[in-house]
Amino acid sequence: MTAHDPVVSIRNLHKRYHHVTALDDVSLEISPGEVVVLIGPSGCGKSTLLRCINGLERPTSGTVIVCGQSPTGHDRDVNLLRRRVGMVFQHFHLFPHLTAQENVALAPRHVLGLAQAECEQRANALLVKVGLEGRGNTYLQKLSGGQQQRVAIARALAMEPELMLFDEPTSALDPELVGEVLSVMRDLVRDGMTMCVVTHEMAFAREVAHRVMFMDHGRIVEEGPPDQVLESPREARTREFLARVLRTQ
Amino acid sequence: MIRRVLPVLALVLLASVRSPADAPLVIGTDATYPPLEFMEGSAFRGFDIDLGTAIAREMGREPQWVNCGFDGILAALESGKFDLVMSALTITEERRRALSFSEPYYTAGQALACRKDARRLETLGDLVGKDVGIQINTTAKEALRKRPGIRIREYNSIDLALLDLQNGNLDAVMTDSPVLRYMLKRSFDDLRMTGSLFTEEHYGIAARKDSSALIAEVNAAMRRLQDRGDLDRLRAKWFGDDSQGVGRRPIGEILRIVIPALVRAALVTVQLTFLSLILGLPIGLLMALMRLNRHRWVAIPATAYVEVLRGTPLLVQLFAVYYVLPSAGIQLGQWPAALLAFTLNSSAYVAEIFRAGIQSLDTGQMEAARSLGMSYGLAMKLVILPQALHRVLPPLTNEAIALLKDTSLVSVIAMVELTRQGQQLTGALAIPMVVWPLVGLFYLALTLPLTRLAAHLERRWQTK
């Protein structure tokens, strides 16, 4: 794998649950340093696509290659691959029995086997980076949703991933807390992180995305630069969706 | 040649089968039947006890008395837990088919008690349509069955039947005459004995069918005691009009007997509960993790384990471990058997508690852990189990309390814990109204700290 090989390469991906088709012949590539934003109505398959990238879902057919490896192989190989792919969830899924710092330091300590002191140092530095300096010893109940999501981003970054997946990272937040999370994500874009983001924040998409993909009924309907997809979409379904989303925003 | 070898061989075999003469003679008894057998503190007392001890010494053996509930006592004899049973056991044709009996050593009869204010009940005919209490599996049942229409109600011990009669829930109680006389004299002021004896019953000492040599020795010893007049002296001591040990005792003296006995019994209850819980926890955790495993060949055996142990009564499991395993060649003592049954049983419940605790966690916890590169096992250890442990604490406390109270079941395998001790004490002292509230207080004193501890831990974890 060279610097120019795609970080994610998906070919003809299908995912079916019993009789429901979640993904229908999806192909997609993400280059190093690229920021791809997935938009679309709920149930269109964007989250499923994201989860296929780090092996939380297994494709029914098609190939997925991430960082030169398949996330559908042997458990041990998938575990190794996941070290290189960070994921941020809609509902944070932080570990409530641990402090903020312990959440961030847990995987470097036990998965990478780094020294405790080094892990704590790394956790503290990342908490500073996401604007939570000095909050390391706090338990999560004492943190707001926005702060919790920033801890979750720090937790994913602690593994020094090559790719970050964001699954509607601001959907569960009160409106006034969305900004602080987006600002942390903006910093990541500036650092050159490769990112795949599922979101309904159209302004954010327009600002940071290199490419926007509109999905509907398990298919990628339209993709292109944000200005083109968001300002003058070619497809009628994209226009309908955008009209609905922008009216509510 | 063959003719000379065979007797020698038979002798060798006989010698190896017979217990060595210096081994104790193990005698089973249900010590809730004064004045024949009862407990005073930790000492066995009563006519059967004195006679059995004299017979054993006459045979040159040391007697070792084992207390056992009457409903399990013959099963225990047959599975080899004792050499003899001596427990006011009436010789009947039915019992003769399964056991060998000594010569009769005492003749009793079934007698009837009713309330003093009630109409006198004299004959079986008077009892038709009435409720009559008896002790479970005793010969009173056969006497009453001769006349159809009598409603028989069976109790675990005779003092409970008498208490129920005194409370007005029964019309009469039928039991062996010496026992009835003793109990009424001791503490049932509102009851009286009516009429004459309904049967003539002979008490005998029972052994297994194949122990005819032992029975012959017992008979010989008994004849020597009879010839020396010892047997008559014992009869006078326990059944004579001024028989000792019969009569009221001051409450202080009673408590001095009751309290230490209950403390000793409570210790057994506590040890059994905690040992089986501590052993059951890791087994239960393992079974829970196996049931949650995605491989069916791992999950199915664990599911079967849990379902069998949860779906059958603990009492049946105890019976199986103590009385049935010996027939498969596995002979366990009381403690190992009780511990095994309780550990298996509690592990099944613990498994379900852990499984529910783990499944109650958001699946996102596992996904978040896995997406950080943790293996399934590591995610379990670092993320899932620490959280599940907090959630299972309240149901585990419930299980500990339930287990503690369930230990009362071990009386069926002749272990003396709190409830069984209560039965023995009420039997011996005939003061159920003092003993049972005390037993209840002892249980409460054991369970209350448990619930307080659990509440304390929950509060501490909550504040995190």
Image (tube, rainbow, N blue to C red):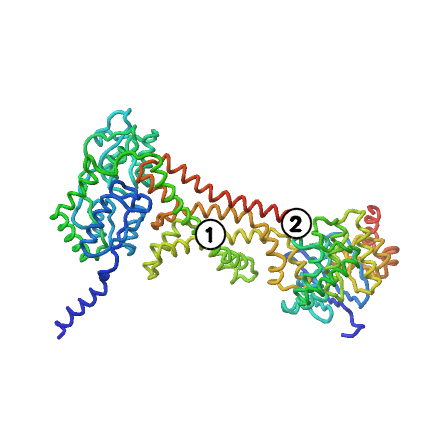
Q: Chain of mark 2?
A: B
Disc 2 designates what residue? B464
Q: Residue drawn 27% across and 44% down?
A: B45
Which quadrant: the N terminus of chain A?
bottom right
Q: Are marks 2 and 1 on the same chain?
A: yes
Secondary structure of the residue carrying tag 2 is loop
Disc 1 designates what residue? B274
Q: Residues within 10 Å of mark 1 (few under 14, many from 20)?
A: some
User: In the image shown, does B181 or B45 lie closer to the viewer?
Assistant: B45
**Residue B150 seen anywhere in this rendered image of the structure:** no
The answer to whether marks 2 and 1 mark residues whose Cβ atoms lie closer than 8 Å is no
User: In the image shown, does A225 or B402 lie closer to the viewer?
Assistant: B402
Secondary structure of the residue carrying tag 1 is helix
User: In the image shown, does A129 or A173 lie closer to the viewer?
Assistant: A129
Residue type of the residue flagged with mark 2: Lys
Q: Residue B397's x, y, as percent?
A: 52, 47
Cα distance in 3D space between marks 2 and 1: 28 Å
As drawn, B372 above or below B53: below
Residue B326's quadrant in the figure? bottom left
Q: Chain of mark 1?
A: B
Q: Residue A143's x, y, as percent?
A: 73, 50
